Image (spheres, rainbow, N blue to C red):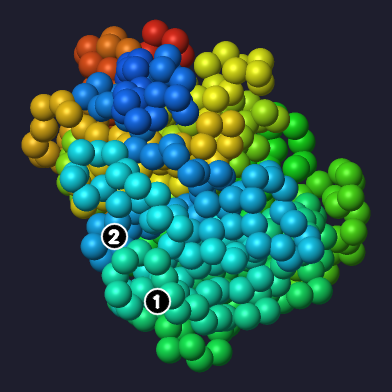
Amino acid sequence: MPIYVSFFRPIIMATAILLNSFMVLAQDQDYPPGTVQMTPKVDLQLKPVKVEVPEKFKELVPDNLTLNVPEGFKVSIFAASGLRGPRLMAFNNDGVLHVANMKANGSAEFQPSGNSSSEILALPDYDKDGVADTVIIAAKGLRWANSLAFYKGDMYVADTHEIVKFSDADGDLVYESRTVFADEIPTASSPHITRTIVADTVNERFYVSVGSSCDVCRESDPERATILMLPADGSERRVFATGVRNAIGLDLHPETGELWATNNGHTEVENTMPPEWIDIIRDGGFYGWPLAFGYQIFIDFDIRGHWRVPPITRDDTLLVQTMERPAALIDAHSSPMGIHFYSDGKFPDIYNQAAFIAYRSGFRGPDPGHKVVALFTDGDGKNSTVGDFITGFWPNPPNQDNIWAKPVGLTTGSDGALYLSSDWINHLIFKVDYVGEATSSDGDDLHDVIIPESIDLAQNYPNPFNPSTQIQFALPKTGHVKLEVFNSLGQSVQVLVDDNRRAGYHTVTFDARELPSGVYLYTLSTATGIQTRKMLLVK
């Protein structure tokens, strides 16, 4: 070996190690591409409540139904008559709830012959008693309607093969005028025949989800497994995002205006993989299918019919590398349906701008599903946590005989209540109200009310940092903890916490202005063990 190489080799290696540490840490080394990081779960401390059934529905709805909700909430039946497969919902400008009654012909299966199977129902509550006064067939003659949206007073319905615009000139909730707004939406007899539409009134456009034509395969139609963007003026639509296997839920974030979606993943491994995702849908974004899932994790192409995808090309690999870290990964096979951001303000402050998501299934996954969860996340999709908000639709898994509802659609009324549809077993629309004592927000209510399910030491933020950074940790139980920082030699440089801390979330500031640049370790010691993470100080 040449002398100059031998002399400089230790310096080169040390520099390479430091540079590598910087690059890894700068990319959130606690969550690198190719890894699965499930979204942390929090405990909303659910309590059982009896579902209130109005007298007019006593013959349609069992009287002994119980659900589990956070303290201060109640659940009642808003509508039951005339429902057959109620799916996604929307309120018109007059505050009347409309729902896609997808299985109105009485069948649970799509009619490939094209026979009319679906209708849109209007459910007015004129006397504001929290119960639908009547059921009005607002529009019919639809093949397999899943969702609707209102834009400038007109109703747009997402059928399996087209988007239909309905107008109600006389305001009687029966829509006399019908025109096809967008035709030749890709469809088939199965799978993924539902279409979801959301109106972006600010940017004057619609988004429509179109699922894949198979579990895992290469599509010949460029509009399959996508989110389409349709200008409201009727001009040419385009593909907004790709690699979206089956997004049932779409909603706009109330603060950022960005589109979010829930996705149903492919059937890879029972119980574990792949996790379902909830994420921001970005213009031109690629979301994995049929090549990858999660955060750039390639599908196992040796499983089932996945062999139809290879060979994997260089372009495929480069495409997968564009996948961004998802805002949330939730349990596999839970079939997330509707997503709805709550921003009315009638619920406790911790739910302001939280997303409610309905899980319609869960048979094959680690979580029994059949519930509604609340996703707490920053507007940019970071720092997400998820907690059960409504459970009890499946009281005793795995016995499938006692499932009594299938949650699907979610929306909020002008009364601040959350409305939830069940499209099978019991065909219902629930109304969820907060009747407890309102609380004010000082920015820390979420930490005070929500208890994490497990101990967690989060990655510091910002990272790299100079001269200070914040470290968050979560405790499911009150107890003694020690949070300590070490240098790269293993020497303790600062003890940040060494006392009893209550159950919940805690944030501590680490001030390193007196310390040199370098890689540091911080550890959280509790009665059950030690967790360690790295951080980088750059001056």
Q: Pointer 1: what residue?
A: 167
**Which percent across, then down, holds residue 265?**
66, 48
- The answer to whether residue 482 is left or right of residue 31 is left
Q: Residue at x 22, y 12 (%)?
A: 500
The answer to which image quadrant residue 128 occupies is top left
**Which percent across, then down, holds residue 163?**
55, 74
Q: Residues within 10 Å of mark 1 (few under 14, many from 20)?
A: some
**Does dot 1 land on a helix, a strand or a loop?**
strand
Amino acid identity at mark 1: Ser
* Residue 429 visible in the picture: yes
- The answer to whether residue 12 is left or right of residue 355 is right
* Residue in the foreground of this view, choosing between 162 and 34: 162
Who comes first in sequence, dot 2 or dot 1? 1
Q: Pointer 2: what residue?
A: 254
Amino acid identity at mark 2: Pro
- The answer to whether residue 288 is left or right of residue 339 is right
